[in-house]
Amino acid sequence: MELAGRKVVVVGAARSGIAAAAFARRRGAAVTLSDSAPAERLPALPPDLAAAGIVLELGGHRSETFTDADLIVVSPGVPHTIAPLAAARRRGVVVIGELELAARWLKAPVVAVTGTNGKTTVTQMIGDMLAASGRRVFVGGNIGRPLIAAVEGEPAPELVVAEVSSFQLDTADCFRPRVAVLLNISPDHLDRYPDMDAYARSKGRIFSRQGADDVAVLNGADARVRALAPPAGPLCTWFGARPAGEAGIDLKGEDLVLEGFDPSRGHLNGERFSLARLKLLGAHNRANAAAAVLAARLAGAAPAAIVRVLAEFTPLAHRLATVATIDGVRYVNDSKATNVDAVIQALAAFDVPVVLIAGGRDKGGGYEGLRPAVQAGVKRLVVLGEAAEAIASAVGTACPGGVVHAADMGEAVRLAHDSAGPGDVVLLAPACSSFDMFTDYACRGEAFAAAVRELGR
């Protein structure tokens, strides 16, 4: 893709947008970085943007800027339906995302991971397994480092491991991962998609450009994932539940075992990887580990390196991470549990009474699906944020200890502390996004941790 001399508009002045704008400018494009938010509502922009000749258009989008562009690069958080983008498409302007921009320049093969839950854990685990095997690996994408940074990495990566979201896949066309992983699909982002079918189709786009030399890694225990298995093109491999006669990985006791590969990969059959020392909580994290092992091995990771990473890998921040144990009560931060299914999985990781803190900004889809898990394991429910009343109405009667409302995270932690006893768990698992009260899920998790530390003083 030639950028020199072209008029490029990058929409969204967050991390990936800034990286895409800087990349395009270095390639000789005339770049405008546009964001609907005014400068004071944005994170501090790098001072060298303007010095590099990037035009900043903040506090609103000018339709003329979009329609006059040769190329528009959309950040994942920007809805694709905004009027200036629609006008540009009508004029024939090419609209892609930062993921697609990177894909058109990357030379290294890509291992890509998507799914509703578990993406970051699996992405990082695969990256660690490949790095431990001596490979030069770039880990990024939706995980925090924009994928476009891999294009100019020095030294150049041998492999790229990328977390990709449905939003990123929506604006991808030529993106072709060598190994594509689809972990699971459950209700999420229904504030952005019209229904579950549309959301699932976006996830399935990860396989759309794969060919016969590529591999798809799919969760056989998830009916929505099974329905998206490509009928032709890549080799389909399975974790969670392996269809008869198909290749993949099985859980046998405490071991993951590779089975079902044809003679071209027959050396993989029978390889075993122990989970006995896995530090991650919950059955869902065993499934995550299975997906990571399968993908990493197919991407060339060494068995000994995989075993070592399985034993040493620790929970990532804000994902079922223990903050402290105070007066016999364990406080666990799962701020990344931003949908109902993630909360159900988090609750299933504990066999002791849980005081659950939930709430935030609603993402669509409802909360009734939480009722069985709340009834079975939640001692009391503490709700906060914009969705507090919706959660309380949907599941409050299922909670044996009832529901209490908190005005902020500090009060939520104090109320949870008052409700918990020795041996219990206080779990932050919001089932919502964070944007009503916090800048992101990490900020929310840090506020929870800070409030917990206050208890210990």
Image (cartoon, helix red, strand yellow):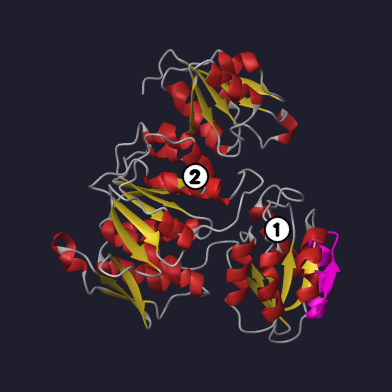
Residue type (three-letter) at the residue carrying disc 2: Ser
Which residue is labeled 2 in the image? 202
In the rendered image, residue 388, in percent from the top left (x then y), is placed at 80, 60
Does 228 appear above or below 326? above
In the rendered image, residue 415, in percent from the top left (x then y), is placed at 83, 72
Q: Per the image, is 408 magenta?
A: yes
Assign a secondary structure to mark 2. helix
Q: Quadrant of the N terminus?
A: top left
In the image shown, does 317 or 175 lie closer to the viewer?
A: 175
In the rendered image, residue 135, in percent from the top left (x then y), is placed at 28, 53
Q: Seen from this angle, which residue lies furthest bottom?
A: 422
Q: Quadrant of the C terminus?
A: bottom right
- The magenta span reads 400-419
In the rendered image, residue 16, in percent from the top left (x then y), is placed at 53, 37
> Is residue 445 something one can see in this rendering?
yes
In the image shown, does 248 or 221 lie closer to the viewer?
A: 221
Residue type (three-letter) at the residue carrying disc 1: Gly
Q: Per the image, is 451 magenta?
A: no
Left or right of 333, for residue 126: left
Report the residue at 48% width, 58% height from top: 224
Quarter of image, res 74: top right
Which residue is labeled 1 in the image? 366
Considering only order in the chain, which callout, 2 or 1, is on the residue closer to the N terminus? 2
Quarter of image, res 305: bottom left
Quarter of image, res 101: top left
Left or right of 123, for residue 394: right
